[in-house]
Amino acid sequence: MDKKNIFFYLLLLPFMFYSCSDDNMDEPDDNGNEIVTGDTCREGITRISDDSLAFVLLAPGKSTVHLIGDFNDWTVSDSYKMEKDGNLFRLKIGGLEKGKEYICQYLIDNKIRIADPYANKISDPVYDADLYPDQIAYPTGKTTEIAMVVSTGEEKYNWQAGNFEIDNINDLVIYEILIRDFTEKRSIKGVQEKLPYLKSLGVNAVELAPFNEFEGNDSWGYNPSFYFATDKAYGTSVDYKNFIDACHSNGVAVIMDMVLNHSYGQSPLVRMYQNANGAPSSANPWYNTTSPNTAYSWGYDFNHESQYTRQFVDSVCAFWIQEYKIDGFRFDFTKGFTNNAGDGWNYDQQRIDILKRMADQIWKRKKDALIILEHLTDNSEEKALAEYGMLLWGNLNYRMNEATMGWTQQNTDGDWNSDISRGVYKERGWVLPNLVAYMESHDEERLMYKNNRYGKEENGYNVKDLSTGLQRTAGAAVLFFSLPGPKMIWQFGELGYDYFLGSTAEDGRLDKKPIRWDYYDEPDRKALHDVFATMITLKKENAAFDTDKFTYELKEPFKYVALESSDKNVVAMANFDVVDVVKDVHFGKTGTWTDYFTGRKIITSSSTEGITLAPGEYRLYFSE
């Protein structure tokens, strides 16, 4: 190594923290923070001093890279030609004004203009958000395509909350939020203003739909482009840190929905190696040329077998944990994390190994990080991942909604269409309760929408009636929160949100939705909210809801779960038929029981007692 490169490395080393791979990264310290040593520089943009920055781009197979930007009037010159060292291109520039923002790009082989894949702020010629304050203007007429915004300024956030820890994963109640559709401000500041509401509801975690930079401004966020930048549509990086800090101060964990199955054509990783049709070429180090998944495919498919992809994935996760104190990730469509062909349903050891490796790297950075997978594969594979310590989404939407609507019939095989027993981890043969069950998520229709539209009617009992549908949804909540293990609510589910745009599930479902905080002031909806809040509090504060000793009957219209603990036993039940039903319920012991909601008492003379419930009626008995 010559003296010039030695000097460059020495300058660079103290400031490179996040974009590192297994091969050039030391073990984290006891707090999960990275200790960076050695002489291998990291990719991305690094502050060297008040007037100097270093740029490092990984671009295998490329011949030349020039840095163009405000500081050289967007001209191509040898002075800003990056030094090629194998697959890396490097350049250090000085003479910059302290703290001033500059816009710049890489010009690759004199034809491809990209922003750095590790940029934490970008400048978009079309979609820069209006609400973002003091934006530097895009250099229209001097360049095209997305550029990065850089500065020598140091942004050190003064965190107020101490080291936040999640007490008990089994007590986790996650509130899924799409920032765009949660408050009238449609910003992360607006979400922060609603923290008192979330705290009063009792949730102890929020899961934000993807908020790293995505294509356009009006999106769910599942079309990511820049993985290290917060999307300006919702606020500044400081706004996001303020929100996370406030959550931690209020005992609420923050989970980031992360899309690492795919990205789209705006991503610089895609744009560096494209075919004529815009798809990744065979030279692309990060992507497959086509998705091997024959059933589902979105965007351009990451090749998770590639060491380049692994390094990038690890860098992304480490960055958000360390720089933003994220408590964990919900990974979108992990079924696609494989190069094996097929529909993704069957057991896939390659995919398991990929996810275990990724989890190990995350846990090196943060030992208690939550790793939640939207996997939805064969149970044998999900069981293996759950026993490794990962959490998995458990979709109860269809069957729970059949129950709330009153359509509780058996099919020709004898199976009940309203059977929700898959919401029980033991039903799946799992040892650990690592199933994040949910009645609604961003991907499904609302329970109350279908209650209102398709609810059953019989002998004057009509599920389409708003108060009736809400009562049945409350019964679903009582059962749902009584099942041991973590749970998730999709925003406004606790208020019976029932808006649906379009005539089909796909028609308009990605569009902005009405924000109905006024629902809280409607008595019947407020009553549903209060049932949710009550059940969440009971779940967190009573040992019975965390037990591994329980029995259940969740197939037939009259459903129940009986929980045993050293303190009190609990039996939750609800009738989802549209007529009265008598059911032999397993209480487990004799004695006096009190219904939490009405205060009415019953005395059981045997371990099983016959109970009659009216349609839509629910009870929650505690032993005395």
Image (tube, rainbow, N blue to C red):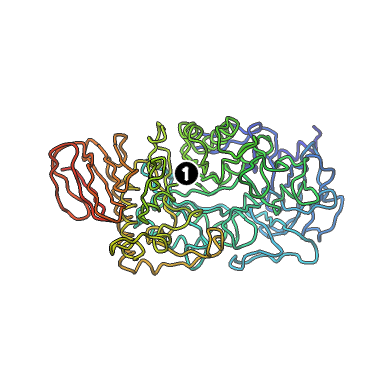
Query: Where is residue 474 drawn, in percent x and y?
Result: 32, 56
Is 578 left, or right, of 609 in this rendering?
right
130 or 301: nearer the eye? 301
Q: Which residue is mark 1?
A: 393
Query: Residue 588, percent across and down?
Result: 21, 36
Residue displayed at 80% across by 52% down = 112
Q: Position of residue 157 (x, y in %)?
A: 53, 53
Q: Residue furthest right?
A: 78
> Label 1 crowding class (10 Å Cα cut-off): few <14, some 14-19, many 20+?
many
Give residue 134's position: percent from left, percent from top: 62, 67
Q: Residue at x 48, y 35 (%)?
A: 379
In which quadrant of the rendered view does residue 457 lie? bottom left
Q: Is residue 351 visible?
A: yes
Badge 1 amino acid: Trp
Locate the C terminus by quadrant. Answer: top left
- Residue 42, placed above or below residue 208: above
Identify whether 351 is placed above or below 332: above
